Amino acid sequence: ISVRVRVKTPTFGEKTYTITGPTENDLRHYRVWYASPDAREAYEYKTEVTIQGRRFGQKPLRWEGDWKKGSAASGELLAEIPEVPADLVEKLDAYITSA
């Protein structure tokens, strides 16, 4: 499983953070900090999910959410994992169950 969080601001452009592997027991924290209260600006983020197939020949499943607005405050970025699209639900079950 790979989760990419793309964050963009007007001043600093776009940055990508990637979380891979089994992360169910590991918390991943990314923080947005501004050096000066006057330099704060709103940001946007987008979450993309990719799941590799376990069997040879299975193509990765991929879906993404919409761009969301973040606050202009310093602190943790809590990114929402987008819902699995209905057309991928059955395929996803086949990818994550044992062969």
Image (cartoon, rainbow, N blue to C red):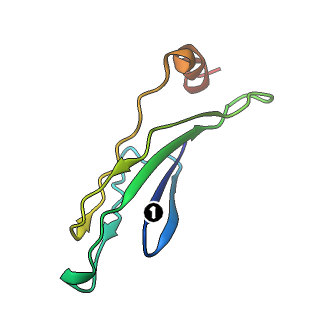
Q: Is residue 99 above or below residue 80?
A: above
The residue labelled by disc 1 is 8
What residue is shown at x 35% (from left), y 62% (from top)? 43
Q: Is residue 19 above or below residue 48?
A: below
Q: Quick one: quadrant of the N terminus?
A: top right
- Residue toward you, 2 or 35: 35
Residue 25: percent from the left, percent from the top?
A: 35, 47
Q: In the drawing, does residue 59 fall left or right of residue 47? A: right
The quarter of the picture where residue 87 lies is top right
What residue is shown at x 59% (from left), y 22% (from top)? 98
Q: Is residue 85 above or below residue 90?
A: below
Residue 18: percent from the left, percent from the top?
A: 52, 57
Give the residue type at disc 1: Lys
What residue is shown at x 28% (from left), y 79% (from top)? 34
Residue 36: percent from the left, percent from the top?
A: 23, 86
Total labels: the figure holds: 1
